[in-house]
Image (tube, helix red, strand yellow):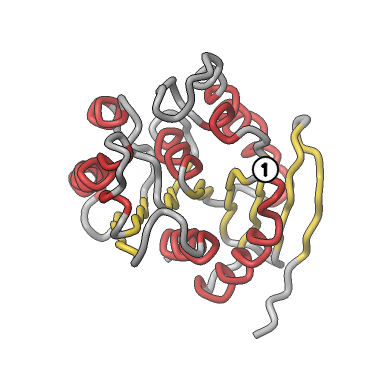
Amino acid sequence: MLILMDIQDVIIGGRSCRIYSQQEPEYLLIQPTARHESAAIDREMELIASQSGHRFVMAAFWVDDWALGLMPWHDDAVSRREAVGQHGTDTLRYVCDVLMPWLGRHYGPLPVVLGGYSLGGLFALWASCLCEGICGVAAASPSVWIEGWMEFASAHTTRAGRVYMSLGDREEHARNKSMARVGDNIRATNAMLMEQLGGACTTLEWNSGGHFGDEAARTARAFAWVMG
């Protein structure tokens, strides 16, 4: 099936973004991505369009240094660089105070879904607790194993109305002890979200395999589910 979509590379608030837009959109989607993933993000857009049945605008904004730009706080297991954990709030402010208003001005006051893969999924979950206006979270294999995540999740309530999470069924069997926490942590996070939102508005999907495995398809399923 041919999906009609306009693609533009633009600078928004000093950051490079790729905007994928359909006519008469119903949702605004936002996702952090890396420049080397441009081919994968193109494929992801096609999959979202074919799976969701809803029209959308997606703003994929480039994050050059994944850990530096997306980590909400420091964890040596992610990076020993002192600066990691000090700039996640910069990205949060960019999404909430620059990108979301820009999209609203250009496409209207549509529901916003923030999502991503790995640290991108973690960032989306974290941001949904702190940023007004995020209606849905699409978190594919989110890195909820980081030190301090469960304490944060226990102390904060998501402001989103729908949350999707997924995990590969081999991820919790990682040799790295920190990463191996991901299974218990995502189950506990899902239980909290079930209490906050109810079973119809949140889900946890288990994929076959480890952390790396067709990230575009996994993330597309996340966005498609949140859009209903």
Query: Looking at numbered disc 1 in the image, what kind of residue is underneath it?
Result: Phe
Residue 83 against residue 156 in the figure, above or below: above
What residue is rendered at 66% in x and 48% in y? Answer: 60
Identify the residue at the far front of this view: 175
What residue is rendered at 47% in x and 31% in y? Answer: 131
Residue 124 against residue 21 in the figure, above or below: above
In what element is the residue under mark 1?
A: strand
State which quarter of the image contains the C terminus. Answer: bottom left
State which quarter of the image contains the N terminus. Answer: bottom right
What residue is rendered at 46% in x and 45% in y? Answer: 118
Nearer-the-camera pick, 135 or 163:
163
| Residue 184 position within the rendered picture, expressed as x and y whole percent measured from the top left | 20, 44
Residue denoted by label 1: 61
Quarter occupied by residue 40: bottom right
Residue 76 placement, left or right of 17: left
What residue is rendered at 76% in x and 40% in y? Answer: 16
| Residue 98 position within the rendered picture, expressed as x and y whole percent measured from the top left | 67, 31
Residue 169 placement, left or right of 120: left
| Residue 5 position within the rendered picture, expressed as x and y whole percent measured from the top left | 73, 68
Nearer-the-camera pick, 40 or 171:
171
Identify the residue at the far bottom of this view: 1
| Residue 70 position within the rendered picture, expressed as x and y whole percent measured from the top left | 53, 32
